[in-house]
């Protein structure tokens, strides 16, 4: 009798991932990220993709599906930068899931991102608006002194929200006969030193004196009874502080990051060097600093203000 020759079945790689597979891969992606901000951004992006992926009938995780997801994001009229951030998270997801297929990550990596046509104009405050904003909180109350210190630090030192809430007593030191925030760990784990103006230091001292704090985090929560509690504040507290006093001034859509951008603009308008402003903000690329400043396009004394065709007054 002839023996039947058994042929080996080709290994078919798994391309239709279920929820357990996606959760496992998502955990692997988040563990590989060091920055808490990156983890938060990637977690949200991956969860949005998983929600869309599972809503479609039995899709394979491949280049075509990711391209369809990009079209789905474009149909929602999201900004190109937002789309590219979410696609970056999906590419990282494919890289961690590459053991399901040798060409999976390579194919998804070839999905093109959304084109950025032009540069969005940021939001800045004027000098008078910035001065009125940080002086608006009531200096006779505990919460008012804390809010004055928060707004003054954001405007005077150009800190991010995460950097502000992580500020401790050990950070504020005297260097070269000037107050500074020393060895501040910023975005991406980058360490920098930020000069602190004297008026910002005075507002912080007023807050610390009435709050009777001497160690730990600089900024704490204030309850409705007007007493300090807890050991820190959250980023949402900073957001609400900025939003509250901006609404009192009649300024709409003002974010804490706009105060950081305003500080950079004030430094540039007062004659500050671009390199020093880059050090202050902690940017790796000077092009990012230029975007903050908007120094390549002037809206004040714009080129089309005096065309010679204006109506005669």
Image (spheres, helix red, strand yellow):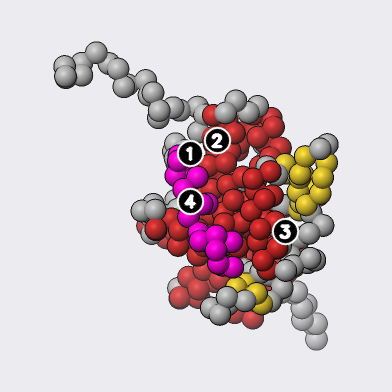
Q: Where is residue 120 shown, x and y percent of the image?
A: 45, 41
Reading the image, the residue beneath label 4 is 133
Could you give the CA–CA distance between mark 4 and mark 2, rounded to whole angstroms?
Answer: 15 Å
Q: Quadrant of the C terminus?
A: top left
> Left or right: 286 with respect to 269?
right
Where residue 145 sits, quadrant-wise, is bottom right
Q: Which residue is mark 3?
A: 167
Residue drawn at (82%, 45%), measured in percent from left and top? 174
Q: Is residue 170 above or below residue 283?
A: below
Q: Is residue 125 magenta?
A: yes
Circles 4, 2 touching at the beta carbon (< 8 Å):
no
Q: Measured along the vertical axis of the image, is residue 180 above or below residue 20?
A: above
- Residue located at (45% from left, 75% from top): 55
- SS state under label 2: helix
Q: Tell which of 157 and 61 is nearer to you.
A: 157
Q: Are marks 2 and 1 in contact (CB under 8 Å)?
A: yes
Secondary structure beneath label 4: helix
Position above or below: 204 against 9: above
Distance from the alpha carbon under mark 4 to that under mark 3: 21 Å
């Amino acid at each position: 009798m002839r023996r039947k020759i058994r042929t080996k079945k080709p290994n078919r790689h798994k391309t239709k991932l279920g929820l357990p597979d996606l959760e496992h891969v998502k955990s692997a992606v988040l563990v590989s990220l060091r920055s808490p901000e990156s983890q938060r951004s990637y977690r949200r992006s991956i969860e949005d993709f998983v929600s869309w992926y599972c809503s479609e009938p039995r899709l394979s995780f491949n280049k075509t599906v990711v391209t369809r997801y990009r079209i789905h994001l474009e149909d929602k009229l999201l900004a190109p930068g937002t789309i590219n951030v979410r696609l970056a998270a999906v590419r990282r997801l494919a890289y961690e899931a590459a053991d399901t297929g040798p060409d999976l990550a390579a194919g998804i990596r070839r999905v093109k991102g959304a084109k950025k046509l032009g540069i969005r104009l940021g939001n800045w405050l004027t000098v008078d608006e910035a001065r009125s904003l940080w002086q608006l909180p009531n200096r006779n109350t505990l919460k008012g002194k804390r809010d004055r210190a928060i707004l003054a630090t954001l405007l005077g030192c150009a800190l991010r929200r995460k950097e502000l809430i992580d500020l401790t007593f050990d950070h504020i030191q005297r260097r070269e006969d000037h107050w500074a925030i020393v060895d501040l760990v910023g975005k991406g784990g980058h360490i920098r030193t930020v000069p602190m103006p004297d008026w910002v230091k005075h507002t912080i001292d007023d807050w610390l004196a009435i709050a009777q704090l001497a160690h730990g985090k600089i900024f704490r929560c204030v309850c409705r009874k007007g007493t300090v509690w807890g050991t820190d504040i959250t980023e949402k507290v900073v957001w609400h502080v900025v939003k509250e006093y901006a609404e009192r001034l009649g300024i709409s859509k003002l974010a804490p990051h706009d105060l950081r951008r305003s500080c950079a603009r004030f430094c540039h308008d007062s004659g500050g060097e671009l390199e020093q402003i880059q050090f202050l903000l902690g940017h790796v690329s000077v092009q990012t600093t230029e975007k903050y400043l908007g120094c390549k396009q002037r809206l004040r004394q714009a080129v089309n203000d005096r065309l010679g065709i204006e109506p005669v007054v």
